[in-house]
């Protein structure tokens, strides 16, 4: 009887150990939260959106250069514009000037931040990209937002927002179709125009 009891105890301990092992292997590390850097700047309340008419510039491609402070992936592209419309948001390799992702984003209400899912792009820490939105939607030139702090200090670059580093604004005047913005205007390097956004998920 004593031998049987010892055997039963050993069996219980073995089963208990297996359960603990199973629990360990079936509880993966929680995913890190998604980040939307442009939206986060707006949500802080420290920065304001000012609606502007850029018809004198004949529209254009507007956005900013950024890099991630950690390896991760970009899963969405989007925008927040003063007017409704179907906008083209583009993601470019800044070094090569090459388009790597693009998405048509339908914004159904004025000033409504809207994101759309893309084929995820794996990004490496410190690699620079440019996110832009074209002001022409459905053949119509739309108004643009200027994002700034509403004070004389404006936005100071580079600026860290979560795991994303905003390096500088970047845009190209007078283009009605998505075009890599190959220049910057130093007179307005304290603003973000557009405004485009994206979803970054760090590893």
Image (spheres, grey):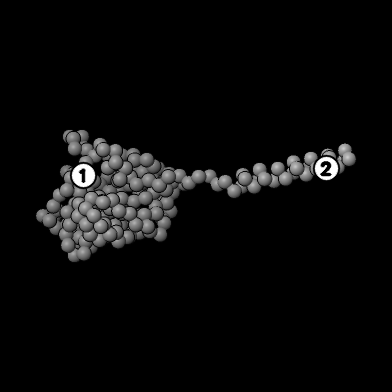
Bin the neighbour count of mark 2 within 10 Å (Cα to Cα): few under 14, some 14-19, many 20 and up. Answer: few
Density class for disc 1 (Cα within 10 Å; few <14, some 14-19, many ≥20) is many
Task: Report which residue position mark 2 lands on.
Answer: 7
Counting residues from the start of the chain, the first of labels 1 and 2 encountered is 2
- Residue at image point 23% right, 55% down: 109
Q: Say left or right for 34 vs 22.
A: left
Q: Does any portion of residue 49 appear in the rendered image?
A: yes
Residue 179 visible (yes or no): no
User: From this viewpoint, which residue is outermost toward the left?
Assistant: 56
Query: In the image, is 9 to the left or to the right of 63?
Result: right
User: Where residue 194 appears, x then y in whole percent?
Assistant: 23, 51
Helix, strand or loop under label 2: helix
Residue at x-position 79% and y-position 40%? 9
Tell me where residue 189 appears, x and y as whole percent. Answer: 21, 43
Provide the secondary structure element on which disc 1 rests: strand
Q: Position of residue 86 (x, y in %)?
A: 25, 61
Image quarter of residue 89: bottom left
In the rendered image, residue 162, in percent from the top left (x then y), is placed at 37, 40
The residue lying toward the viewer, choosing from 174 and 20, is: 20
**Quick check: 90 above or below 168?**
below
Q: Residue furthest front?
A: 1
Quarter where residue 44 is shown: top left
Name the residue at 18% across, 45% down: 50
Within the image, what quadrant is residue 59 found in? bottom left
User: Residue at position x 15%, y 49% from top?
Assistant: 52
> Horizontally, is 165 left or right of 154 in the view?
right
Circle 1 residue: 49
């Amino acid at each position: 009887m004593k031998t049987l009891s010892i055997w039963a105890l050993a069996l219980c301990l073995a089963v208990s150990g297996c359960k603990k092992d199973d629990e360990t292997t079936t509880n993966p590390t929680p995913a890190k939260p998604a980040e939307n850097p442009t939206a986060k700047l707006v949500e802080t309340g420290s920065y304001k959106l000012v609606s502007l008419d850029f018809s004198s510039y004949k529209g254009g491609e507007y956005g900013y250069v950024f890099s991630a402070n950690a390896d991760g992936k970009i899963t969405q592209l989007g925008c927040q514009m003063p007017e409704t419309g179907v906008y083209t948001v583009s993601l470019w390799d800044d070094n090569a000037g090459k388009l790597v992702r693009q998405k048509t984003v339908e914004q159904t209400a004025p000033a409504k931040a809207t994101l759309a899912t893309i084929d995820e792009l794996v990004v490496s820490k410190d690699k620079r990209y440019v996110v832009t939105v074209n002001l022409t939607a459905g053949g119509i030139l739309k108004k643009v937002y200027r994002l700034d702090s509403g004070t004389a200090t404006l936005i100071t670059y580079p600026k860290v927002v979560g795991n994303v580093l905003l390096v500088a604004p970047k845009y190209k005047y007078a283009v009605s179709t998505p075009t890599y913005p190959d220049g910057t205007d130093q007179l307005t390097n304290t603003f973000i125009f557009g405004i485009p956004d994206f979803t970054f998920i760090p590893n």
